[in-house]
Amino acid sequence: MTLEGIVNTARSLSYYSRLQEVTANNLANANSDGFKADRLAAHATRGSGHPVPVETTDLEQGSLKNTGRPLDVALEGQGFLVVRTPNGDRLTRGGSLRLDGAGLLVDAHGRPVLGTEDGPILVNGTKVEVLADGTVLVDRAPAGQLRIATVEDPTTLRKEGAGCFVPAGPLVPVPPTDTVVHQGAVEEANLDPLLSMVELVNIQRGYAANVEALKAMDSVLGEVTNEVGKV
């Protein structure tokens, strides 16, 4: 029983360590536009005598924050913006956009934001308006329309860093009725920093409790071993 308890406690310590990493990373990105928090939960699996940690990405929408910047956009509803990277097209919910030196619409990391014509949007003018369907007007003339897309199964999306998701299959257009584009706003991370800090404290307490339990079982095992050795 003691050996089994030591093994189970060691697994618990490993789980708490990974949970702390995930929670700390979420907290570090609490101010990142469009960040999607990772969640870790213990799941029972068939054929296994103990739960195993399963990590998933929470794709729930975060709160929308008004910024007043005309190039900021926030998506209310399904889908992602599509940006072009050296490794291929990627999906993002980060809406802090700007113009590069050539007048192309890019995200906060300098990646061109694609339009429905599968190319970057060129802004050649002074006044920029973004309509609810993603149409971009420059000096009241159409300059393109933001490409808003998703995949058949969003749970297959894989984080690549810098707010990007790697699609596991072909991109699927999102119907205009499913998403509203808000100009002058960004989507905040879908987590509560205060609750994340409280969770970190609870994780540390759980880890410490398991360490104490491990020490106690190790002490019992040592006593048993010594007694058996005397016999």
Image (cartoon, helix red, strand yellow):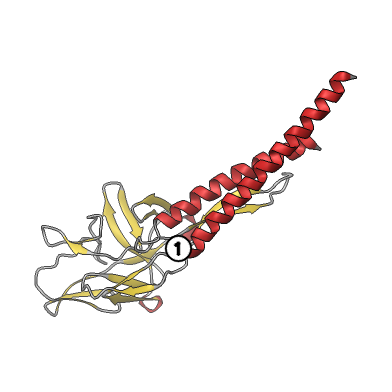
Q: Quadrant of residue 101?
A: bottom left
* Residue 133 rendering spot, x and y as whole percentages: 30, 77
Placement of 150 over or under 4, stated as above or below? below
Farthest left residue?
125
How many callouts does the rendering have?
1
> Between residues 2 and 34, which one lies in front from this camera angle?
2
- Residue placed at 40% from the left, 54% from the top? 28
Q: Quadrant of residue 90?
A: bottom left
Farthest right residue?
231
- Residue placed at 62% from the left, 43% from the top? 13
Q: Which residue is mark 1?
A: 193
- Residue placed at 31% from the left, 54% from the top? 89
> Between residues 90 and 16, which one lies in front from this camera angle?
16
Q: Is residue 8 left or right of residue 194?
A: right
* Crowd band around label 1 with a 10 angstrom C-alpha radius: few (<14), some (14–19), many (20+): some
Q: Is residue 58 left or right of residue 221?
A: left
Name the residue type under label 1.
Pro
> Between residues 225 and 6, which one lies in front from this camera angle?
225
Task: Specify the quadrant that holds the C terminus.
Answer: top right
- Residue placed at 46% from the left, 52% from the top? 24
Q: Quadrant of residue 218?
A: top right
* Residue 36 rendering spot, x and y as whole percentages: 43, 60
At mark 1, the secondary structure is helix
* Residue 31 rendering spot, x and y as whole percentages: 36, 62
* Residue 1 rendering spot, x and y as whole percentages: 81, 38
